[in-house]
């Protein structure tokens, strides 16, 4: 199905689901843009490279790019139902779920020109989305993949681990297990180091396919002990055949650390600059 036809298909779907004149997707400069209330959503992709041979791209991670946009064509009652209100201290799960679903649809449509059968896409899911859905996690998004001609097996669901959600770990693990039953791969992302005991417990319970770490955070917290820390974490990850990813490789020192870490994959501006200048 052509991209313009896919956009109209999903616009029709969103319109039916919300029972409103809500057609959030459009194409601008060959990229799909989503509108959610007064937010404009687009995609930024980052290659995942093999540390042993950085020419090889094994997949892509995607980050959401959000900007403000006037949306005069939405009626006030639609704004109340659909938009995230930044003035609220509490965001309803339903709004989070709607936003998350729209964002991931935008990402999948923008990923199509990059998609290759031997590569994977890393898609982050909001923890509140997992907690807000009680069963059949991934079922909705599976239909998005099918319409785009993609598969769950080449899609990695990423959960960012923070201390804020420690008490919900069991519920999050159940939700991620639902995704896995549908064929999705699973990744845990640690932006800020939590205790070794807690990290190990999560990895052993969930047995993720990938564990992603920020090199910047490792270097900041551990200094000269960074390599020792990475070797320890890699042993934990490898216990269940998981693969390690190091992010934010932006300089030569970080690149050396990545090569010596034993981790399989890396992302960062260092590699992109190196390859673009070669």
Image: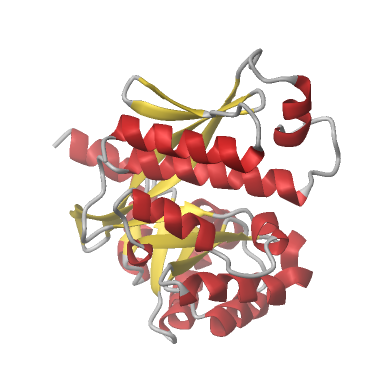
Looking at the picture, tell me which residue is in the foreground, 144 or 228. 144
Which residue is rendered at x = 70% and y = 73% of the image? 171
Q: Position of residue 225 (x, y in %)?
A: 51, 67
Q: Is residue 86 left or right of residue 238?
A: right
Which residue is rendered at x = 21% and y = 53% of the image? 116
Q: Tally the marks.
A: 0
Q: Is residue 59 left or right of residue 108?
A: left
- Image quarter (top left, top right, bottom left or bottom right) of the N terminus: top left
Q: Is residue 251 visible?
A: no
Looking at the picture, tell me which residue is in the foreground, 220 or 91. 91
Q: Position of residue 60 (x, y in %)?
A: 34, 50
Q: Position of residue 227 (x, y in %)?
A: 44, 68
Which residue is rendered at x = 51% and y = 51% of the image? 216
Q: Position of residue 211 (x, y in %)?
A: 47, 68
Where residue 86 sits, quadrant-wise, is: top right
**Above-or-below relation of 135 to 258:** below
Q: Is residue 209 visible?
A: yes
Where residue 19 sits, quadrant-wise, is: top right
Where residue 23 sits, quadrant-wise, is: top right
Which residue is rendered at x = 43% and y = 68% of the image? 184
- Image quarter (top left, top right, bottom left or bottom right) of the C terminus: top left
Q: Is residue 28 left or right of residue 97?
A: left
Q: Is residue 158 left or right of residue 192?
A: left
Looking at the picture, tell me which residue is in the foreground, 232 or 179. 179
């Amino acid at each position: 199905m052509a991209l313009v036809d896919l956009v109209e298909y999903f616009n029709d779907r969103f319109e039916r689901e919300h029972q409103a004149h809500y057609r959030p997707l459009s194409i601008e400069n060959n990229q799909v843009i989503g509108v959610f209330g007064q937010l404009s959503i687009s995609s930024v992709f980052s290659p995942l490279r093999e540390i042993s041979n950085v020419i090889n791209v094994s997949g892509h991670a995607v980050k959401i790019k959000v900007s403000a946009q006037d949306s005069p064509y939405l009626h006030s009652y639609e704004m109340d139902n659909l938009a995230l209100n930044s003035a609220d201290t509490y965001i309803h799960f339903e709004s989070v779920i709607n936003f998350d679903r729209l964002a991931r649809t935008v990402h999948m449509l923008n990923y199509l020109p990059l998609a290759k059968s031997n590569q994977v896409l890393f898609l982050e899911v909001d923890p509140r989305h997992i907690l807000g859905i009680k069963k059949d996690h991934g079922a909705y998004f599976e239909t998005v993949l099918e319409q785009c001609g993609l598969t769950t097996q080449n899609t990695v669901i990423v959960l960012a681990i923070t201390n804020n959600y420690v008490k919900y770990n069991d519920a999050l693990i159940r939700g991620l297990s639902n995704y896995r039953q549908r064929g999705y791969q699973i990744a845990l992302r640690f932006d800020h180091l939590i205790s070794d005991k807690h990290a190990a417990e999560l990895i052993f319970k969930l047995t993720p396919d990938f564990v992603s770490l920020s090199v910047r955070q490792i270097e900041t917290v551990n200094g000269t002990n960074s390599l020792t820390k990475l070797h320890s974490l890699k042993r934990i990850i490898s216990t269940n055949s998981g693969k390690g990813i190091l992010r934010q490789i932006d300089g030569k020192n970080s690149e050396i650390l990545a090569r010596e870490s034993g981790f399989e994959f890396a992302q960062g501006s260092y590699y992109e600059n190196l390859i673009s200048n070669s």
